[in-house]
Image (tube, rainbow, N blue to C red):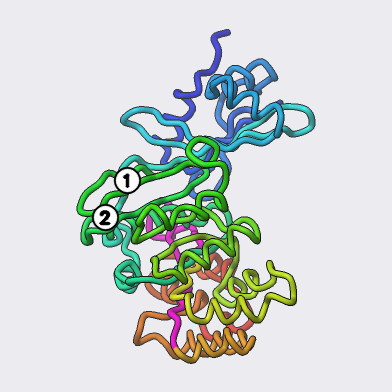
Amino acid sequence: MPRIELDVLLEELVLREGSDLHLRFGETPILRVAGKLQRMEQKPLDDQDLEYLIYGLMNPLQKDKFHKMLEFDMAYEISGVARFRVNCFKQMGHIGAVMRIIPLKIKTLDEWGFPSVFKKIAELPRGLVLVTGPTGSGKSTTLAAIIEHINKTRKRHIITVEDPIEFLHRDRLSIIEQREIGIDTLSYAEALRRVVRQNPDIILVGEMRDLETVAQTITAAETGHLVFSTLHTIDAVQTIDRIVDVFPPAQQQQIRLQLSTTLQAVITETLIRRKDGPGRAAAFEIMICTPAIRNAIREAKTPQIYTSIQTGSRIGMIQMDQYLKNLFHQGIVEYEEALAHCNNPDEFQKRA
């Protein structure tokens, strides 16, 4: 029987407008389409199949790193079709991988139908902007659209540090350098320690993973740059508390002070299955830092931020539950889907 070719599986993922391909021992290849898993009509994969599919992506250095670390992230591209973010791993002694699609074309903020306040956020002169949400919620896509808006409208020097590089940007009005962990730099923290010497206007940090990266990211924003990054948090308040909690207690008040002056906005995102057509719709919580919010951060009164978001609609703020209600009332999503993704189900049921 001829071997399954990886490009054939990935092209099928693109044709079905899916998001992920799962390769694991003893299972047929599995696609995630519109948030749901679909098994392909193929024979179950054995170790030889998996080694052929997964090791075929790697050069000798990457293969050696995977053998040492037992985990590996990389990117793969089918010319003219799509790029893919690849995570290789071991499970129960077998190798496996998940491949996430990254479209070659970067859609604009308008093409995605994102809130207009995103353009104002993209035009900020300095400070820290965080895009948060669970894995697979569209954070990278949102950041790519924001960076591309800057690229098309402003003459700026943009440096991205990513693991791996996902969306490929081409210079328009801006000049963009994209650096990949493990290829162009050793780590986020190492890259950030030196990035300010490279005369950037805008810095994108793929993910704030550890204390050193968080500290370096905040410092970069403090020194007059516009900095974008991501966290796996479900709302603005949790985002602020998570950053503060990364630091030892003796440093936390200082970090609150730094955040209260550098943080400009937090965008929290989730994806929800559409009722009005195929695919998924994005739902957002948007917090813009006002004097009241800066004071709440500084004074460790972050729960007060919920009220500020509720009353800040005139400057583009909105709570996640309100955004979900709007999607439901517009007929874009089912009530049950909106309820499943909201942060406060009891309140949602009372007011929807």
Image quadrant in which you'd find residue 179:
top left
- What's the amino acid at mark 1? His
Q: Which mark sits nearer the N-terminus, 1 or 2? A: 2
Residue at image location 34% in from the left, 28% down from the top: 79
User: Are circles 1 and 2 on residues that touch, CB within 8 Å?
Assistant: yes
Q: Residue 28 at x, y = what percent?
A: 62, 27
Residue annotated with mark 1: 169
Along the viewing direction, whichever of 124 and 114 lies nearer the viewer: 124
Around disc 1, counting alpha carbons within 10 Å, would you say few (fewer than 14), some (14 to 19), or many (20 or more)?
Answer: some
Q: Is residue 184 above or below residue 172?
A: above
Q: Is residue 292 above or below residue 118?
A: below
The residue nearer to you, when weighing 182 against 327, is 182
Residue at (58% x, 89% y) in the render? 304
Q: Which residues are magenta?
A: 269-290
At numbered mark 1, what does the secondary structure look like: helix, strand or loop? loop
The residue type indicated by label 2 comes to Asn
Return the x and y of residue 229 as percentages of the image width and height.
Answer: 49, 60
Tell whether 327 sits left or right of 346. Answer: left
Q: Looking at the image, is 289 positioned above or below residue 153?
A: below
Question: Which residue position holds label 2?
Answer: 151
Which is the main secondary structure of the residues drawn in magenta? strand
The residue furthest right is 92
* Residue at the (52%, 76%) spot, across then down: 321
**Distance in Å between CA atoms under marks 1 and 2:** 8 Å
Q: Quadrant of the N terminus?
A: top right
SS assignment at label 2: helix
Q: Residue furthest top?
A: 1
